[in-house]
Amino acid sequence: MPASRFARRFAAVIALLAWGALVLQYALLIGATLDGIGPLLGTLRYFSFFTILSNLLVALVASAAAAGDAAPRLRFFARADVRGCAALAIAITCAIYYFVLAATWAPQGAQLLADVLLHYAVPLLYVGWWIACAPHGRLGWSDPLRWLLFPLAFFAWTLLRGAWLHEYPYPFVDVDALGFAAVLGNALVIGGLFAVAGVALVAVDRLSPLRR
């Protein structure tokens, strides 16, 4: 099988898993909030998790890679810098969940399936696809700075939503529990992780044998 065809089929598998996991998690969350905050605020809560946003970005990038020229509306998500941003975001999602969040709860049943797909399967498959199948040699050393806008925008939204609803998606950004100074310190550490990992990702891109 030609490498390009394999890369597109690999991307299609990732897209299907990512979209499936996102739909499953949305159904589970909305089902759990019907008797509480309702579907409108439930949807807002859904899109307030970085896990959801990073998996959504991967789903769009993988869909663009699988469709190729057949999906001109997804052309933005076929750009090298957007593919790299997706690799960085989903890798950080996996790392923070594994090292920080996984021990804080024990999902069961369908929630366990969604959890594994969103935090492990999709991240590992996409990063593997990006390393082994995506064309390389197109990233610049300034890209990690631009990629920081994604987590920065998420952090700003988290603070605004938290001030409004007093609800935070992750314990390390809970201003009500930790105070703003501690949350800002946590954010700086995570921002540093994004920056270092972003530079490493560009280095991988420039040293890749798939460089063009």
Image (cartoon, grey):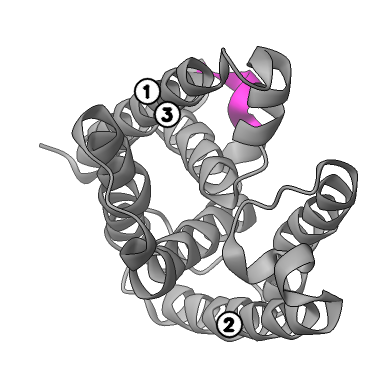
Residue 91, image x, y percentages: 43, 64
- Residue at 69% from the left image edge and 66% from the top image edge: 173
- Is 48 or 108 nearer to us in this picture? 108
Q: Position of residue 28 (x, y in %)?
A: 41, 23
- Span of residues in magenta: 71-75
Q: Quadrant of residue 135?
A: bottom left
Camera sees residue 4 = no
Q: Earlier in the sequence, mark 2 or mark 1?
A: 1
Residue 74 is a magenta residue: yes
Q: Secondary structure at mark 1?
A: helix
Q: Residue visible at 61% across and 47% down?
A: 79
Identity, as a three-letter code, of the amino acid under mark 1: Leu
How far apart, in angstroms, are the residues tagged by discs 3 and 1? 4 Å
Image quadrant containing the C terminus = bottom left
Q: Which residue is mark 1?
A: 24
Q: Secondary structure at mark 2?
A: helix
Describe the element under mark 3 as helix, strand or loop: helix
Q: Is residue 23 left or right of residue 141?
A: left
Say few, some or many: other residues with alpha carbon within 10 Å of mark 1 (under 14 / 14 to 19 / 20 or more). Answer: some
Which residue type carries mark 2?
Leu
Which numbered circle lies on residue 25?
3
Three-letter amino acid code at the position of disc 3: Gln
Q: Is the magenta region chiefly helix, strand or loop? A: helix
Residue 111 is covered by the magenta coloring: no
